Amino acid sequence: GEMAMATNLLQAQSSEWALLRRHKCEDVFGVQLAGNAVAAMGRAAQLIEETCNVDFIDINMGCPIDVVCNRGCGAGLALKPTRVQGIVRTMSEVLSCPLTVKMRMGYEMDKPTAHKLIPKVIGWGAATVTVHGRSRQQRYSKLANWDYISECASLSTVPLIGNGDAFSYEDVEEKMALTGGVSAVMFARGALVKPWIFTEVKERRHWDISSSERLEMLKTFTKYGLEHWGTDELGISRTRNFMLEWLSFLYRYVPVGLLERLPARIQERPPAFCGRDELETLMASSNAADWVKITEMLLGPCPTDFNFVPKHKANAYAASTDSITA
C-alpha cells in the first residue's frame, strides 16, 4: 500500500483510507504508516488490522520530504529515539501481524545512526528492518552506501533488507554477494522507472520491452485508476495526476536495445535520444507537457486550467519537469 499518515486515518479522511485498499491480485500486502505520536500510531495500527486485509504494517522512518520531516515524521522521527521506542512498543503490542521498520542511514550526511537504532527497534518489537543507504540530507543524491548497509546487517538478529540504487538483476546479485548478512534487496525508484524489473530479476535477463508493451501497462493503470476512483470528472483527474507522477519516473527508462553497455545504472543521466518509433521517443521526453499528451491518449483532453507539479524532485533531470500548465 501507499504511505498513509496516521492522523489523517484517525480523522477518517476517505482519500487516506483509499490508499490502504488491497487489490485482489496482491498476494502479499502491507501498509506503511507515518506519524510522530505514540497514541495516534498505535490506534491507527489497531484500526488498520481490524478493518483492512494486511500481512504486515511498516513504520516510515525514511521519507525525506520537508513537509513530512518538519512534522517529526518520516526520517525526522529517527531524531527522537525515545518517541521511536514508544511507537514501536505500542504498535507491536496491539498488532498480531508483523511490524516492520524502514529507515535511512541517519539524518545528517556524515553522521549515520541506523546501526545504533537497529538493535533497539528489534528489541522493542520490530520483526524486520529495511535500511536505505543514504541520509535524509542526501535524499537521492550520490550512491547508496551498501558497505554501511552490510555493517547494519551484521548487527541485526532479524531479516534486514537493503535499499538503494537497485536497477537490474545484476545489481541484486552483486549487492547480495557483497553484503552477506542482507536477507533481501528492496526496489524503490527502480520499480517506478521499469516496473517489469521483477520479471527481469526472476528470469535473470534484460527485457527489451517495446513502447507498445509499455503503453499497454499504462492502459492497465488507467483501467485500475478509473475502477478505484471512478469515471466521473474527479476520478479521471485523480487517475491523471497519479499517472503523471508515475510518468515522471517512467521517462527515465532507456530501452535495452539502445544501450551501449549493460546493465544500466539508476544514477546515470543519459542524453536525450530518439527512440525506435515515435511513441518510444515521446515516452522518453523529459518535458512534462509530453507526459500530459500521453495521459490525453488514455483519458482524453485535460481541462483548460490543468496544472501539474511533480511531487518528487528526485524524478527530474531538468527544469523542464518542474511544472506544466494546460
Image (cartoon, helix red, strand yellow):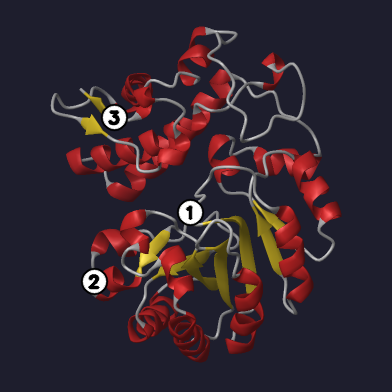
Question: Residue at coordinates 41% horizontally, 76% vertically from top-left?
Answer: 48
Name the kind of residue labelled 2 in the image: Ala
Q: Position of residue 276 (x, y in %)?
A: 60, 8
At x 42%, y 25%, the residue is: 318
| Residue 55 at least partly seen | no
Identity of the residue furthest to the front in this view? 110
- Residue furthest bottom in the image: 93
Q: Position of residue 190 (x, y in %)?
A: 60, 41
CA–CA distance between discs 1 and 2? 33 Å
x then y, percent, for residue 30: 52, 66
Between residue 269 and residue 88, name the one nearer to us. 269
Q: Return the disc, 3 or 1, that comes first in the chain's sequence.
A: 1
- Find numbered disc 2 in the image and state the secondary structure of the residue it sits on: loop
Q: CA distance from mark 2 to mark 3?
A: 31 Å
- Mark 1 or 2, nearer chain start: 2
- Distance of label 3 from label 1 (alpha carbons): 24 Å
Considering depth in this image, is 219 or 158 the residue closer to the camera? 158
Q: Nearer the viewer, residue 193 or 317?
A: 317
Instruction: Please tell me how crowded label 2 is: few (under 14), some (14-19), or many (20+) other residues with Cα within 10 Å.
Output: few
Instruction: Find out whether the residues at labels 2 and 3 contact each other: C-beta distance under 8 Å.
Output: no
Type of amino acid at the residue the image marks with label 1:
Gln
User: Looking at the image, is 8 positioned above or below residue 277?
Assistant: below
Find disc 3 in the rendering and name its residue.
Answer: 323
Tell me the SS state at disc 3.
loop
Up the image or down, 323 lies above or below 59; here it is above
- Label annotation for residue 137: 1
Where is mark 2, residue-wise? 12
Picture residue at 61% right of the left edge, 20% below the top = 210
Q: Nearer the viewer, mark 2 or mark 3?
A: 3
